[in-house]
């Protein structure tokens, strides 16, 4: 049962993309912080049961240039299998985001890369999962009659994931996988110092889906 639970965690890692950085136009050499929450819903093979993975993180954004951001997200994930007691898993993610104007339109494009790592121990089994990928998409900056600014976006992700499951004496699993995901969402700039982002990510191959919420302070 323990080995099967670790494999469940592996499925979550290969689907779970690192959340986008805020699309707020952070100036060069400036930084901002935010809080992230995500919930991943997965259906196990043969409809055995559903697995829910919730993650909490602190994000730090840094303006490398006016149109390039670097970001880092340390956090914890909590997996609920409906049975097995799985302890919290420390996670860490980092990425880079570039955005610019699409010539002749009011749209902007964004492109970036991200990576993450997760560690889990269910004695005597050790789990390490890593992923590296890229994403690309379109966004629009829409003004309103109030101080609110709406930034809807959509895009696609490509993830390359690696997992190692072992005990102190032998390797139980060492494998890689690839996955394409889609995503869509909206960021609402409530004021020049605060924005809220909601994102939905989905697999092109499975029924799995991910909901993410961010609160960013600029």
Image (cartoon, grey):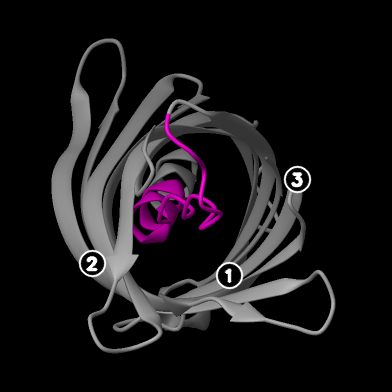
Label 1: which secondary element: strand
Determine whether label 3 and label 2 are within 8 Å by CB. no
How far from the left and from the top, in percent, is residue 191? 79, 56
Which residue extends farthest top?
A: 168
Label placed on residue 179: 2
Q: Is residue 157 visible?
A: no
What mark, if any, has residue 41 been given in the picture? none
Label 3 crowd bin: few (<14), some (14–19), many (20+), radius 10 Å? few
Q: Which residues are magenta?
A: 8-28
Q: CA distance from mark 1 to mark 3?
A: 20 Å
From the viewer's perspective, tell me whether residue 77 is left or right of residue 95. right
Please name which of the two marks, 3 or 2, marks the residue nearer to the observer: 3
Residue for badge 3: 193
Indicate the secondary structure of the residue bearing disc 2.
strand
Q: Residue at x 46, y 30 (%)?
A: 92
- Residue corresponding to mark 1: 199
Residue found 76% across the figure and 50% down from its top? 194
């Amino acid at each position: 049962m323990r080995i099967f639970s670790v494999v469940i965690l592996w499925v979550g890692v290969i689907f779970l993309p690192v959340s986008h950085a805020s699309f707020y136009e952070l100036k060069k050499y400036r930084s901002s912080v935010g809080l992230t929450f995500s919930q991943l819903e997965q259906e196990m093979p043969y409809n055995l049961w559903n697995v829910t993975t919730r993650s909490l993180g602190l994000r730090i954004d840094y303006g490398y240039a006016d149109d390039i951001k670097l970001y880092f997200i340390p956090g914890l994930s909590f997996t609920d299998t409906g049975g097995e007691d799985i302890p919290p898993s420390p996670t860490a993610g980092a990425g880079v985001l570039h955005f610019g104007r699409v010539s002749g339109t009011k749209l902007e494009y964004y492109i970036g890369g991200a990576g993450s790592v997760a560690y889990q121990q269910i004695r005597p089994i050790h789990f390490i999962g890593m992923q590296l990928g890229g994403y690309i998409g379109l966004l629009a900056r829409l003004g309103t009659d109030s101080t609110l600014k709406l930034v809807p976006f959509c895009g696609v992700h490509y993830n390359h994931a690696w997992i190692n499951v072992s005990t102190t004496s032998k390797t139980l699993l060492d494998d890689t996988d690839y996955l394409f995901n889609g995503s869509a969402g909206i960021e609402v700039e409530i004021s020049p110092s605060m924005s809220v982002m909601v994102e939905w990510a989905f697999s092109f191959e499975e029924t799995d889906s991910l909901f993410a919420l961010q609160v960013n302070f600029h």
